[in-house]
Image: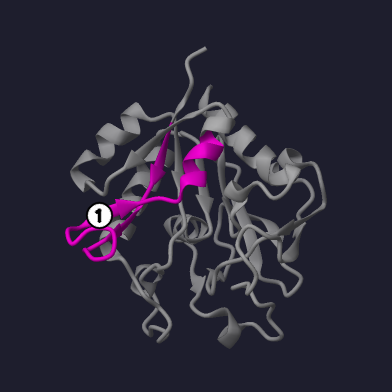
């Protein structure tokens, strides 16, 4: 059986550090977990004019996280929190890729910032800074290393995510200061933190469209592994 091609969005920097010239980057475990699940990772430079070519070639899309935020103007906000930092070129590319993949009903998995981008593309808005908008909020930007679990999330019964992970609760890592704020038409909340923050979304209108606020690519639990297994399996069909 041909292994499915999984496009993975990457981060970008103008220059400095790795190279004085602009460069792209991706944490290795995004690719290695796709390989482990039986897919072939394909890294996607931010070439807007190639979105249709990418979408036609790929079997699934993984929208990775990153240390930046979606521009609040994209979900209709008139004010911007001081903590918000954007990468407009990357966001424009990722939004175009998500729309193209969903229009073709190809599997989409959004992780952390990728989940937030997916939520906005689906018509949602975001909490711009959790500590300022959520009373008694957890520390969603955990102080311990990202390859360690931090807090529990409740998996909503009856959702695709619940069917995939097979449990009602998972303990996950956490590295975000924003989150989905609302539940627009067509979006289903599939996971929440104890403080009520939305930790996962999905849709029923697409074959596989799931976003999670944590980082399952670290495979801290069997549930994390099952998410990638289900994603890559969906891309085979």
Q: Position of residue 100 (x, y in %)?
A: 35, 41
Residue 141 vs 22, above or below: the answer is below
| In the displayed structure image, the side of residue 119 where residue 97 appears, left or right | left
Task: Give the percent coordinates (x, y) of residue 176.
Answer: 55, 69
Magenta-span inclusion, residue 135: no
Q: Compared with residue 231, is residue 224 higher up or lower down, i.e. above or below? A: below
Observer-nearest of 151 and 157? 151
**Residue 206 in view in this figure:** no
Q: Residue visible at 32% across and 42% down?
A: 44
Q: Residue furthest top?
A: 1
Q: Nearer the viewer, residue 115 or 41?
A: 41
> Which residue appears at 80% of the width and 41% of the height?
166
Q: Picture quarter containing residue 154? A: bottom right
Magenta span contains residue 33 = yes
Q: Is residue 149 left or right of residue 110?
A: right
Q: Which residues are magenta?
A: 6-34
Residue 236 pos. (x, y %): 53, 23
Please tell me whether residue 3 is drawn above or below residue 195 in the rendered image: above
Question: Is 221 in front, or is 169?
Answer: 221
Residue 203 visible in the shown view: yes
Q: How many marks?
A: 1
Q: Secondary structure at mark 1?
A: strand
Disc 1 marks which residue?
23
Q: Is residue 142 above or below residue 66?
A: below
Residue at the outermost right position? 168
Tell me which colouring the rendered structure shows: one colour
Does residue 200 appear to the left or right of 74 in the view shown?
right
- Badge 1 density bin: few <14, some 14–19, many ≥20, Cα 10 Å: some
Q: Position of residue 64 (x, y in %)?
A: 46, 52
Q: Nearer the viewer, residue 86 or 123?
A: 86
């Amino acid at each position: 059986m041909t292994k499915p091609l999984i496009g993975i969005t990457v981060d970008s920097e103008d220059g400095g550090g790795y190279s004085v010239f602009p460069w792209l980057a991706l944490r290795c475990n995004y690719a290695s977990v796709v390989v482990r699940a039986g897919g072939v990772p394909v890294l996607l430079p931010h070439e807007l004019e190639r979105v249709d070519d990418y979408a036609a070639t790929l079997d699934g899309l993984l929208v990775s996280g990153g240390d930046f935020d979606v521009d609040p103007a994209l979900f209709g906000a008139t004010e911007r929190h001081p903590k918000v930092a954007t990468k407009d070129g990357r966001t424009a590319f990722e939004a175009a890729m998500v729309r193209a993949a969903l229009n073709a009903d190809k599997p989409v998995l959004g992780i952390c910032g990728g989940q937030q981008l997916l939520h906005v593309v689906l018509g949602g808005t975001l909490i711009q800074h959790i500590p300022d908008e959520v009373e008694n909020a957890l520390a969603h930007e955990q102080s311990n290393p990202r390859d360690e679990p931090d807090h529990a999330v409740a998996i909503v019964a009856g959702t695709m995510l619940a069917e995939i992970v097979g449990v009602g609760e998972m303990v996950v890592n956490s590295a975000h200061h924003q989150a989905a704020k609302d539940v627009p038409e067509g979006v289903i909340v599939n996971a929440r933190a104890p403080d009520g923050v939305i930790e996962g979304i999905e849709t029923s209108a697409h074959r596989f469209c799931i976003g999670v606020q944590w980082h399952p690519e670290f495979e801290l639990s069997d549930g994390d592994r099952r998410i990638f297994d289900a994603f890559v399996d969906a891309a085979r069909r």
